[in-house]
Image: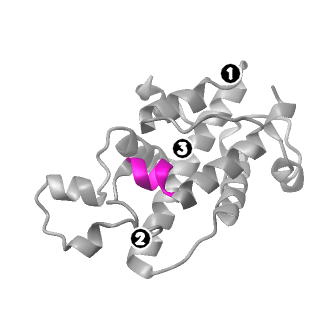
Amino acid sequence: MLNSVWKAKAPQKAIMTAWRVLKNRIPTCDNLRKRQVPLCEEDTKCKECGMQEESAYHVFLACPKMEEAWNDLQKWLGTATVRPNSIESHFGTFAAFGKEKKVKNLLLAIWVCCIWLLWKKRNEKRFEYKEWDPKKLVMEVKIRMWSWNRIFGIVEDVSNLDSWCADKFVPRMM
């Protein structure tokens, strides 16, 4: 199932980031420690919440700010899930929504897009000290997905950005 990430209709840099996240090969603090990269204790904490050591699971799913982003995204998609216990199960659950192939392709691309943007926001916060808002992130996912849809032709029934970004866009396609 993890190999299906390579089928995402998305830019290669986003797919590669998602693949690295799924394989836990992303340079989070816990992975850097496993590679014996010296880090001071304060640098290993999540820069968003400061509550836990930074791990892929925490960065992409468990941090309260990330949870808020996923919850807002799921509202747009008209879906609801409990937080899974791994990134792989989150991917599997997300990829299982929808019956039609075009819907599955869209959801796969949305997951890849969200993972890629979350990693970018994490890096901007850690290295450039930029704050970000989960609601704005979801809007950025919507805008990027509209753009990717125009490039990759994931679904054909979208006329403009306003209709794409409307609440509960995806269920109209299912």
Q: Is residue 43 above or below residue 113?
A: below
Three-letter code, disc 2: Lys
Q: Earlier in the sequence, mark 2 or mark 1?
A: 2
Q: Which residue is mark 1?
A: 101
For residue 169, side relative to residue 99 (left or right): right
- Is the N terminus in the top left, top right, bottom left or bottom right quadrant? top left
What is the tally of numbered marks visible in this picture? 3
Q: Nearer the viewer, mark 2 or mark 3?
A: 2
Residue 112: assigned label: 3
Question: Any magenta on residue 141?
Answer: no
- Residue 70, horizontal then vertical, whole percent: 62, 49
Q: Is residue 49 above or below residue 6?
A: below
Separation of residues labelled 3 and 1 (CA atoms): 17 Å
Q: Nearer the viewer, residue 29 or 153?
A: 29
Three-letter code, disc 3: Val
Start-end of magenta stretch: 57-63
Q: Nearer the viewer, mark 2 or mark 1?
A: 2
Q: Earlier in the sequence, mark 3 or mark 1?
A: 1
- Residue at 83%, 41% (x, y): give it: 169
Label 3 neighbourhood size at 10 Å, few (<14), some (14-19), many (20+)? many
- Residue 137, horizontal then vertical, whole percent: 64, 61
Q: Which residue is mark 2?
A: 47
For residue 104, side relative to residue 172 (left or right): left
Q: Quadrant of residue 100?
A: top right
Q: Secondary structure at mark 2?
A: loop
- Residue at 66%, 26% (x, y): give it: 97
Q: Nearer the viewer, residue 57 or 167?
A: 57
Residue farthest to the front? Answer: 51
Residue farthest to the left? Answer: 36
